[in-house]
Amino acid sequence: MKLSHRPRRIRVILAALAATALIAVSMPAVASADEDEAPAELPALHVDGNWITNADGEEVTLQGVSVLAPEQNDLCTYCDSRPTSELIELAAEWGSGVVRLPVTEIGATTDLAAYDAEYIAPYVEQAVELGVYLIIDLHLVRDYGDAAGGVPRSTVSRFWDYVAPIYGGVDNVIFEVFNEPINPANWDTWKDYIQPVVDSIREDAPDTLILMGSPQWSTMLNGALTNPIEDDNTAYVFHIYPNQGSPTTALLDSKFGNAANQLAVVITEFGWNPPGEFSDSITAGTTTSWGVPFREYLDAHPSIGWQAWILDNFWKPQMFDYDWNLLGGEYQGQFIKDWLAGEPNGSPCSSHDAVGASVQVSSQYSTAYGGENLTDGDCTNAGRWLSATGDTAPTATVSLDAAQYVSSVGIYSGYTGGSGVVLVDFTVDVHTTAGWQQVAAITGNTSSAREVAVGIADVDGVRLTVSNPSASTTEVKIARVYELAIHD
């Protein structure tokens, strides 16, 4: 097809009336529905080559978030859980065009009618009312097949044989058939297992978009290039987190990008948070080193849809702290919200609440590397503060123009190309009317971007005190800090 004849391309990132207004710009005007009429469903979605398109022939990039499985919502005793309906509404307010709804407690004897009535049906109805797509995600993380510990096909078929007749005619609904099959780690074996499930779904839901995972926690979609699912409305899923490596173009091409040149691909799980209580060994990463380059890649590949994991404060990597403050800075929450809103891509090192704030430092290596560089938004080598040789406790104090809530502080240190020159041991204190209080004592740091959770109101000052500025045995022993980034 010639480029000049391509269908119109839209981004499904707006909710409710905003989404309707976007499409109406390029479509004939239609009469408005009366207030007492049922809300109109969204256009059905279809796979067309490596794109998902709607019934009007428009190419669609499904962008949104996952919410916590409703049946898991009250398990966290310290999270002050919020209703699933409230989180779905928040997702729509952020601009999510699609919300992924995990379904976790499904087995061979589950009362599916009762489960549907409590954990699925209300949210399908809400999605229709809000004008967003809803992914019913059979959120199994298990081996598959008849071996010990595996999920037999009959369990998966039983669920979809119940769900497909009910929701197969609802255009807002998408089916994700099996979240993360693990072993056997073989695509052909997986296809033999799941193809009959797809065939059975098609008997009752001939037109519903299907999202297809793969073995090894949905990381083997490349197998579909040579042996695809026998279905013309299936898109392929990939899940990726920082433990899989730095999101370079070469890595992402090999994981799913090359396949996306031929297949419709949706990243139904990704996310990160800095090392600490809001991440683990799989999800530990930063916005600067992982989120920014990952978004840059997806922005350049608009046929690939995505749903960020997870709009909650319980399962990792969370977007909120336990008091429901949005996690910003090197945490993913604010970044995902801004992405959905169409804000420019960028590191929180260069855009934060303390840009331009006054700074006092204990020493400086030279006038070119003074304390003012800590709040200049310049995260290049020239924009650093360097402490003086012989300063055994380099200290920097940022004074804010007005007291404010501080969710986190980002400490960016080292220099490009340097080895072992990031800050190793340091403390972070904040100042309020009650005086100074320590919020973090970091030891053994190896990250050039280290985010410290704060969660304190009425802060008017932040202090960094360094006790070990570098692990290097060859470089001069001084503090090298790009920025002290303060985020509300």
Image (cartoon, rainbow, N blue to C red):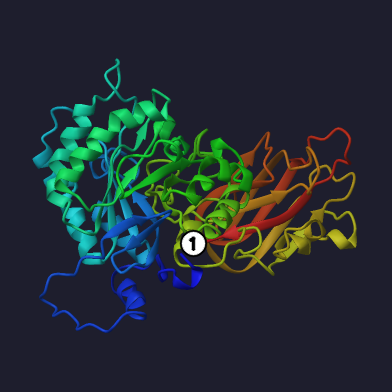
The relative height of residue 441 versus residue 404 in the rendered view (above or below) is above
Residue 314: name its quadrant: top left
Q: Residue at x 33, y 58 (%)?
A: 98
Residue 469: name its quadrant: top right
Q: Residue furthest front?
A: 1
Assign a secondary structure to mark 1.
Answer: helix
Give 58 or 478, whichever is nearer the viewer: 58
Mark 1 lies on residue:
339
Q: Residue at x 47, y 57 (%)?
A: 336
Give 213 or 336, whichever is nearer the viewer: 213
Q: Residue furthest top?
A: 148
Q: Can I make out residue 236 in this image?
A: yes
The relative height of residue 66 versus residue 351 in the rendered view (above or below) is above
Q: Residues within 10 Å of mark 1 (few under 14, many from 20)?
A: many
Rendering coords of residue 425 (x, y %): 71, 38
Rendering coords of residue 29 (x, y %): 27, 84
Residue 101 is left or right of residue 62, and the answer is left
